[in-house]
């Protein structure tokens, strides 16, 4: 009796212990989710491809996963444009209000053609992997300053691998005997440079050594009309071939257990390829055969035996084939089989080999980033255990199913895709003012959304674009990810998703079976529960505003200065200064600031004992470096050639805008050398970047005398320079003061009166573009180069302490989209309206009545126009609509 009672007590204690363990695990998951709420970003762009000289217009949506509520966490977003050579060439910060923002990138007409990337993230998102940043590949042509077309390919020349490039003008003339500089950057290897000469066909060929595994190639040369041309190319691994990837449903093949197994066929470029798959035993007995879809994906259930070897062969339409061995079949293990295609539930079956059937508790947890939606327990009393997960309260998107032992050890995982049309989509409709339109016709688009009883806020934000389809290449659709495919799918899978919109072409009847194959093939990942169950602090807090932070140190020392007074003064308005005190580590921070880009600040420091004898060190922003693109297969070469029609259309359109005075063309000035005999009055120690004396005017020391201050000595002596309150301005640019350079150091114009006139050897004035160009952005308003008699005065008696001038990155101010109004008198009227983007409306608000509208004019070109509407409601419902408009000639 006692033994039975003891056994009962032990069973109860074990049950309580197991219950406590799952409760603790679920609590840790809940804590993890609360500390790691995921933000997602989506950018609605006005179109898929661009040309240098055009503008990328975008609307930003920032949501919190998994319900896609508009985020109120982050107030600042970063948006970057990354070049084909993986360099950030444009970066802006934009303010977020209720998860919404707008912005644009003006593409210089000197921009190199190629496959660019737009990347966006918040500071909070930096706590997660950069793979979860928003990213989209943008092909950009250049017909404004680049008239060269290329066609590149890998060529086998005997035993040698060659990368061959043909160069010709847009008119088709080859670049014959042209000297071309190149830089080759192999993957993970040392950079190599050299020169090549094109042959009579305008072709160059670069030999790739046997150990070459891929990389990038940059070219620089002169075109026939002596323009400097830059080109970049991605070179694939010349030894790469079609391949087969195999994914058992739970990560392992287990003997005599039915296991759904995914197959993915990849080309050397990383794209999917359709094929017929045959699985055979080592004795050539056929086990299974099936066909993949157009993206090279497919799956089939297999029952295999341990100790046998199996081979999968892919047969392609051209008659070629490739084979690979299946993973080894294990004698012992688990298999988790999932059916997500049922209407009201997700069925999950755990199968185990006989040696693992122990009668102990087994748990299934369905969660997203720590947020648990379903947890269930069963005893492992047999070879198969079935779990049913009701779909009623599950969000749409990617969910993680995990099987845990009674000791909370994960043993199997499967990602599933859930989709609920009613709770996910915000129905949106459009009604136009007429059934048909002609060129330069007015279109009035009335938008309406249908709120239902579950919508509590009845508020939605939308954006709309209208594009002339006859002027875009349909092949660029592969670059496109809609708001639905981005927020529900692409943002949660870290690998390359080929054609994400393929699965959502019909939003009321998505491709669930193929999405499940995608989860099986590309969504599989190894279990990582340590991140969920270990409480950790986040490195980056949500950005509520801009921050200027730094450290106050004793002059020329590492020692910090606690309790120092730090004042931040915007030069645009001295009355708006703010101050703070440093902490015990000498740290200071001005948080939640809002200021426009290019605003200049003065920072002053005043220590309790040190007074102004302190150094101010400003923190550099922690910007993540450009990561290798997960969309690498979309980074293609020869964009000018591939999108030649768009390039020519863009040339004509930008030419019309230039003729109407709406834009200006960048002029690349060639170097002009003027020789004359003159006496060089500039001091030999001058730090003039053009060389001592190469200036528009030079004042020597003997011309500076009889003045109370240095500014008074210069006032009236410098041609084309006017002093206001001791600050010099060029008469060519009266809005901004001239840049002052003292012994090679940039100082503020207002500091010019700190200089002792007796110590000055020469003053050089740079006002013409030929002299200021070398100073870049600092030379825009002219430059005054001052040289002291010792040549290093700024490093000795003139080094200002306790004061620093900074120009931190501020908030970008978006521009206005150009929209002709042909029923009104306008200043700039297009002779020929050749727009590709016909309309861009980023700020459409749908109030409680569910209605809004906008209007636009068609261009001079008939064809089919596509209206795309996207957006999100406050309840997290996603809106996406594509509507075709036929425009006929007048």
Image: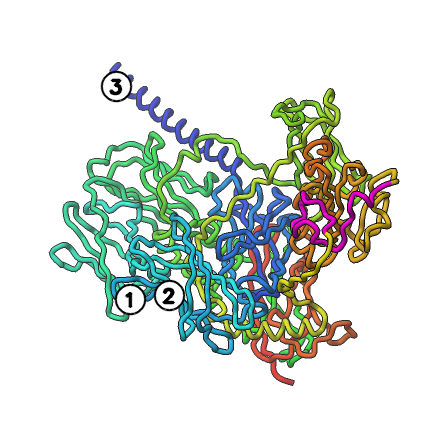
Give x and y (percent) for residue 554: 66, 25
Query: Disc 1 or disc 3, which is closer to the eye?
Result: 1
Q: Name the residue rendered at 67%, 61% in the picture.
A: 675
Is residue 864 shown above or below 234?
Answer: below
Give x and y (percent) for residue 352: 25, 41
Is residue 673 shown above or below 120?
Answer: below
Real-space CA distance between mark 1 and mark 2, rounded to the nearest whole angstrom: 11 Å
The numbered mark, 2 or 3, whose residue comes first in the sequence reads: 3
Residue 575 as seen in the image, left or right of residue 557: right
Residue 688, magenta (yes or no):
yes
Residue of label 3: 4
Closer-to-camera residue (587/331): 587
Residue 700, magenta (yes or no):
yes
Query: Disc 2 or disc 3, which is closer to the eye?
Result: 2
Q: Name the residue rendered at 28%, 62% in the picture.
A: 160
Are the residues flagged by discs 1 and 3 in contact, CB closer than 8 Å?
no
Of the numbered discs in the image, which one, if any, rests on residue 183? none
What secondary structure predominates along the stretch shown in magenta? loop
Real-space CA distance between mark 1 and mark 3, rounded to the nearest whole angstrom: 83 Å
Is residue 15 shown above or below 531?
Answer: above
Of the numbered discs in the image, which one, if any, rests on residue 157? 1
Q: Name the residue rendered at 19%, 41% in the picture.
A: 331
Give, as a single range, the part of the protein colored magenta. 680-705
Are the residues flagged by discs 1 and 2 in contact, CB closer than 8 Å?
yes
The C terminus - image quarter = bottom right
Disc 1 is placed on an element classified as strand
Give x and y (percent) for residue 640: 50, 69
Q: Name the residue rendered at 22%, 51% in the picture.
A: 326
Residue of label 2: 205
The numbered mark, 1 or 2, whose residue comes first in the sequence reads: 1
């Amino acid at each position: 009796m006692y033994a039975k009672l003891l056994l009962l007590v032990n069973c109860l204690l074990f049950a309580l212990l197991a219950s406590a363990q799952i409760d603790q695990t679920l609590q840790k998951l809940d804590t993890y989710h609360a500390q790691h709420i995921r933000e997602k970003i989506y950018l609605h762009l006005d179109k898929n491809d661009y040309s240098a000289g055009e503008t990328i217009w975008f609307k930003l949506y920032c949501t919190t996963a998994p319900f896609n509520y508009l985020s109120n966490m982050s107030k600042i977003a970063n948006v970057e444009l990354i070049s084909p050579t993986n360099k950030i060439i444009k970066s802006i910060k934009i303010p977020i209000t209720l998860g919404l923002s707008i912005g644009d990138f003006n593409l210089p007409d000197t921009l190199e053609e190629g496959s660019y990337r737009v990347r966006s993230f918040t500071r909070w998102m930096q706590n997660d992997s950069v793979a979860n940043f928003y990213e989209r590949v943008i092909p950009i042509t250049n017909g404004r300053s680049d008239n060269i077309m290329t066609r590149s390919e890998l060529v086998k020349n005997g035993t040698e691998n060659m990368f061959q490039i043909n160069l010709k003008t847009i008119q088709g003339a080859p670049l014959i005997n042209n000297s071309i500089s190149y830089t080759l950057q192999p993957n993970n290897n040392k950079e190599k440079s050299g020169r090549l000469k094109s042959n009579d066909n305008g072709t160059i060929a670069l030999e790739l050594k046997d150990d070459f595994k891929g990389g990038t190639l940059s070219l620089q040369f002169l075109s026939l009309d002596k323009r400097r041309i830059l080109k970049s190319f991605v070179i694939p691994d010349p030894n790469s071939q079609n391949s087969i990837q195999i994914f058992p449903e739970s990560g392992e093949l287990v003997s005599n257990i039915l296991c759904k197994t995914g197959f993915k066929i990849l080309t050397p470029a990383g794209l999917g390829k359709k094929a017929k798959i045959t699985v055979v035993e080592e004795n050539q007995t056929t086990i299974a055969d099936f066909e993949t879809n157009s993206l090279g994906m497919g799956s089939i259930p297999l029952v295999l035996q341990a100790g046998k070897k199996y081979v999968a062969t892919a047969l392609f339409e051209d008659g070629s084939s490739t084979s690979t061995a299946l993973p080894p079949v294990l004698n012992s293990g688990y298999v988790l089989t999932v059916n997500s295609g049922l209407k009201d539930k997700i069925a999950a079956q755990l199968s185990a080999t006989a040696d693992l059937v122990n009668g102990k508790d087994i748990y299934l947890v369905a969660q997203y980033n720590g947020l648990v939606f379903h947890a269930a327990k069963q005893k492992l009393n047999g070879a198969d255990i079935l779990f049913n997960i009701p779909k009623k309260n599950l969000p749409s998107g990617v969910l993680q199913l995990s099987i845990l032992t009674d000791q909370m050890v994960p043993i199997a995982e499967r990602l599933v895709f859930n989709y609920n049309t009613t709770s996910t989509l915000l129905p949106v409709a459009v009604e136009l003012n007429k059934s048909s339109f002609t060129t330069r016709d007015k279109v009035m688009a009335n938008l309406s959304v249908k709120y239902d009883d579950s919508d509590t806020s009845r508020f939605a934000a939308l954006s709309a674009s209208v594009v002339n389809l006859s002027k875009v290449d349909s092949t660029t659709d592969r670059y496109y990810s809609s708001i639905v495919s981005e927020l529900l799918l692409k943002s949660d899978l870290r690998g390359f998703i080929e054609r994400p919109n393929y699965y959502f072409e019909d939003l009321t009847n998505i491709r669930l079976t193929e999405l499940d194959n995608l989860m099986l093939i590309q969504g599989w990942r190894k279990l990582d529960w340590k991140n969920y169950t270990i409480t950790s602090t986040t490195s980056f807090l949500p950005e509520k505003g801009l921050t200027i932070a730094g450290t106050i140190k004793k002059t020329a020392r590492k020692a910090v200065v606690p309790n120092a007074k730090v004042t931040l003064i915007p030069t645009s308005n001295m009355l708006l200064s703010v101050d703070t005190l440093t902490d015990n580590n000498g740290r200071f921070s001005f948080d939640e600031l809002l200021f426009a880009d290019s605003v200049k600040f003065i920072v002053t420091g005043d220590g309790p004992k040190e007074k102004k004898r302190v150094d101010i060190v400003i923190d550099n922003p922690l910007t993540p470096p450009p990561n290798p693109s997960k969309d690498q297969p979309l980074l293609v070469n020869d964009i000018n050639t591939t999108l030649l029609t768009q390039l020519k259309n863009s040339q004509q359109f930008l030419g019309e805008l230039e003729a109407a005075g709406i834009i200006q063309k960048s002029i690349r000035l060639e170097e002009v050398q003027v020789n004359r005999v003159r006496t060089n009055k500039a001091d030999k120690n001058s730090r003039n970047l053009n060389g001592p004396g190469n200036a528009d005017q030079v004042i020597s020391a003997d011309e500076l005398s009889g003045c109370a201050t240095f500014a008074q000595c210069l006032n009236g002596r410098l041609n084309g320079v006017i002093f206001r309150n001791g600050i010099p301005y060029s008469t060519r640019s009266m809005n901004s003061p001239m840049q002052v350079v003292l012994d090679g150091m940039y100082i503020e114009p207002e500091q010019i009166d700190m200089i002792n006139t007796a110590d000055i050897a020469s003053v050089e004035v740079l006002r013409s573009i030929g002299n200021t160009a070398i100073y870049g952005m600092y030379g825009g308003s002219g430059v005054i180069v001052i040289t002291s008699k010792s040549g290093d005065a700024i490093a000795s008696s003139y080094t200002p302490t306790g004061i620093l001038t900074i120009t931190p990155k501020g908030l970008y101010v978006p521009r206005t989209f150009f929209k002709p109004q042909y029923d009104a008198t306008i200043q700039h009227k297009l002779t020929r309206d050749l727009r590709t983007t016909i309309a861009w409306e980023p700020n459409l608000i749908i109030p409680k009545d569910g209605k809004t509208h906008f209007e636009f004019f068609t261009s001079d070109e008939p064809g089919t126009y596509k209206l795309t509407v996207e957006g999100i409601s406050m309840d997290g419902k996603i809106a996406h609509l594509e509507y075709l408009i036929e425009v006929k000639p007048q």
